[in-house]
Structure formats: C-alpha cells, structure tokens
Amino acid sequence: MTTPIQHLESYKIPTTSQPKAIRHISELELTGTVFRNRIAELTGTTVDLSDKQAEFTYKYMVQNIISRTANDKVLDMSDIYVASSKQASNFIGQNQHVLIEKESTYKPKVNSDGTKKPKKGSKKILAIQVYNDNKDKNLSRKEFIALLVKDVDLTPAGASTYYSNLKSEKWS
C-alpha cells in the first residue's frame, strides 16, 4: 500500500511545497471525474461530489497531506477528507462570484478561408514589411493603401493611418 505522499508523487505532484503542488494540479486542467477518482484512491471510498467540489476537495487534501506529513503526524485519510471537504465548501461558498462559469462568447477571428487572423501587433509588423518591400515602386498613396488593405487585411481607414505612420517614418 502506498502512502499519501507516494500517491502524490506518482502523479508527479511536487510534495516539498503546498503552493507548487496546487499550481501543478491547476495547470493540468483535470476533470471532475479525475479528481473524484484520485480522492477515492486516497480515501479508499467513492465520493459523490460536484466537479468543483471534487476539484477543491482534492486540492485541499493535497495541501493537508503535505502539511501534516511535514509535521510527522500519522495521516488519517478519512479525517483529511472530512477537513478538506469542509475547507472546499467554505472556499466555494465564499467565492461564488469568482467561480461562476460563464458561457464562452469568444469567437476567434478568422479569415474567409478559415485560417486564423494574425494577433494584435502582427499587422503592424506585416505592414512594415509590405512598405519596405514596395517603397521603391513609386506607388501612389491610393495604390499603397489598396495594397495594405489586400495584403495586411486592414480596413481602408486603418490602411490610411498605417500608410501615414509608415510614410512619416514614425514606424521604421
């Protein structure tokens, strides 16, 4: 039978620091089922918890295991589970406003062909490249703005501003 610390280490959870352990667990983006299974592995019983309750109970269990092991106490996993479950309930109750899951309304910007549009700042870099590649071609202002609209995916107004910044060497 493995010890609780060995259990944590088997999942590569750092056991030298509570914050490191919690950060590691949070970065894994585990599901409620995984948290419930890990709690069951530690306690030897199945648990019926919501996903959020299971997540925070497990995180508090990890903290309690690390702190109690550091104090050389004999670990009673049922006591740790009960204490951790209470801590999780209190945390969730006190932080409802932060933990409410919103329906995502974010839609990534995509081009007409379905490819992702460049991130903010990328257009400036691309515009500078287009300008440097074409500044010796004696293009009119109107032609250059049309080129920026086409190649950099700018609006005509945006292309006009970019052209002005490029021409005045504000952007080099």
Image (cartoon, rainbow, N blue to C red):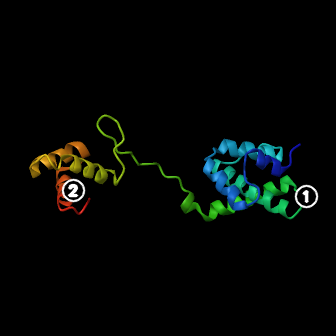
| Label 1 residue SS | loop
Choose between 143 and 102: the one closer to the eye: 143
Instruction: Check the image and report above or below for 150 versus 83.
Output: above
Residue 64, given in percent of the width and then of the height, sits at 78, 60
Q: Is residue 108 left or right of residue 50?
A: left
Q: Amino acid at mark 1?
A: Val
Relative to 90, is 111 on the left or the right? Answer: left
Foreground mark, 1 or 2, reads 2
Residue pictured at 78% horizontal, 42% vertical? 46
Residue 153 picture location, percent across and down: 25, 45
Residue at 21% across, 60% down = 165
Element at badge 2? helix
Residue at 25%, 60% in the rendered image: 171
| Closer-to-camera residue (133/166) | 133
Dot 2 amino acid type: Tyr
Q: Are marks 1 and 2 in contact (CB under 8 Å)?
A: no
Q: Which residue is mark 2?
A: 162
Decide which of tag 1 and tag 2 comes sooner along the chain.
1
Instruction: Please count the marks in the image.
Output: 2
Q: Quadrant of the N terminus?
A: top right
Residue sticking out furthest to the right: 74
Q: Position of residue 68 (x, y in %)?
A: 83, 61
Distance Cα–Cα, label 1 vs label 2 = 68 Å
Where is residue 69? Give x, y as percent: 84, 59
Q: Is residue 36 in view from this perspective?
A: yes
Between residue 108 and residue 158, name the one nearer to us: 158
**Is 81 above or below relative to 149?**
below
- Residue named by callout 1: 74
Whether residue 83 can be seen here: no
